[in-house]
Amino acid sequence: MGESGPLSPTILTIGSLKGGIGKSTLALNLAQGLSRLGKKVLLIDLNPSSRHTLDRSDKGGSPQGMVQLLKGMATPSSILCHVTLDDEYGFHMVSTRVSTPNEALFFEKQAMDHKVPPLVEQLSRGFEVVLLDAPSGLGSVAKAALESSHWAFAVSTCEAETLRALPLYTTLISWIRVHRNRLLNFGGVLIQKFDNHSKIQDTICTSLTKRLGTIFLNTKVPLDQRFEVAALRSIPLWRLPRAEDLVGVFEELAQEILDILFNKEARDALSQQIDHISGHTQWLESQLGAICREYGLECAIVSDGLGFPIVHYNIGEGAELFAAFGPLAGDTMGRAVDMLDLGQVDQMVLGIGDLKVLLVKRLESEKENYYFLALLPKGFEWRQGLSASISRLVDGL
Ligand SMILES: Nc1ncnc2c1ncn2[C@@H]1O[C@H](COP(=O)(O)OP(=O)(O)O)[C@@H](O)[C@H]1O
Ligand SMILES: [Mg+2]
């Protein structure tokens, strides 16, 4: 395997902004699930720092990886490692094999110089589905994974802090699509570590599904200690006794993903949903932009009652700028919202340095809470009509 074949590979990034949320676990078990459904699967671990469970447990794995291939010290077939599931099924895997800080820098530099997409393409020949286990964050390797892919799936837990980081990751996906890789599609959000017994996770999930619909895949990976037990024993989940139910979740997830990738109806439904959301978002953005320009607001965000941004204006095309504004807004909002929720006031103005203020305003529409955040120059004068314009915008959500 690995040499050119008649199949044209579909390449998927499994990525996220946050680390430790279960991306690598998901990618590994998804590779297993897809293989059991009869697909020829390659799992590429792009993490310079990781040692996959399989690296430790599978004897005979290649000591060489992408670093050695990039340095001309290895061939593609010599870095592919076969993972046997049982007699009938199995998949292939490749790692970076970074073993020194210098090699880590070397790999990151290669990613920055756009050397990863041709490398992934070369390795993918002969496979049907290729999973890229991307490092967390907005770094060069995370970007390189998206540059190399046809599909991006964002992994998240159903926890507020992780979900809050999602829009930044989807902004990165859009940025890559516009500037680097026109073939990239957004596949959806994969929920990891879903706690079936947590009422708040259920509330968050229901609220977001109501607003964003099919962006979330139906199959959620449950929070389960057996993942940790498997990790402790350095074995993949499918070698753990009495874990068939959990292993089955990934077969279900694999089927759902294949439907998105290869079933035109399912794919069209998803793109319609995404187009609808982005069409509505564009309309909201233009409205918000008009308000900001009319009243002299530098930039603004409208978020839902849980604090998730719905629409924003002028907080930067580039993900980096958004990153700079995001934590500021999130952190300030956390505190301001506590005070607003006491109910005595419905808006607050917080000073930022000597020149700017952040306005946080709470609004209600159809019994739902929304928050409006805007950055203004100090000395800004509240003009009549601004409150009404913001209310109208929120009513349009
Ligand atoms: N569904 C789950 N339930 C409980 N623990 C999990 C689950 N998925 C992953 N883990 C554990 O969480 C930790 C981080 O997982 P990992 O896949 O390495 O995350 P990432 O690749 O996002 O950094 C590991 O210890 C792993 O065993
Ligand atoms: Mg990982």
Image: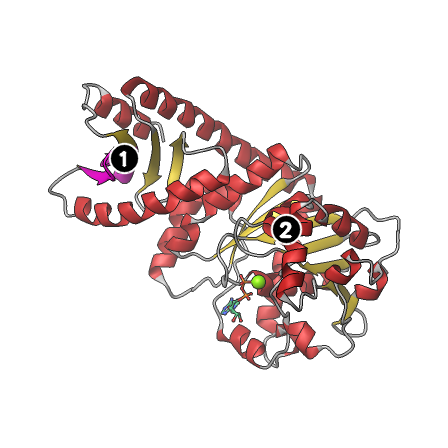
Dividing the picture into quarters, in which one does residue 250 lie?
A: bottom right
Hey, which residue is sitting farthest left in the picture?
344
| Residue at horizontal 34 percent and vertical 60 percent from the top | 199
Q: CA distance from mark 2 to mark 1?
A: 38 Å
Q: Quadrant of residue 102?
A: bottom right
Q: Is residue 373 magenta?
A: yes
Nearest the viewer among 245 and 324 is 324
| Dominant secondary structure, magenta | strand
In this orientation, which residue lies closer to the viewer: 385 or 226?
Answer: 385
Q: Can residue 269 be seen from the camera position used here?
A: no
Q: Which residue is mark 2?
A: 13
Element type at mark 1: loop
Specify the quarter for ligand 2.
bottom right
Q: Nearer the viewer, residue 176 or 390?
A: 176
Tell me the amino acid under the disc marked 1: Glu
* Bounds of the magenta segment: 348-374
Residue depicted at 27% across the width and 30% down the height: 376
Question: Is 314 situated above or below 343?
Answer: above
State the residue position of label 1: 366
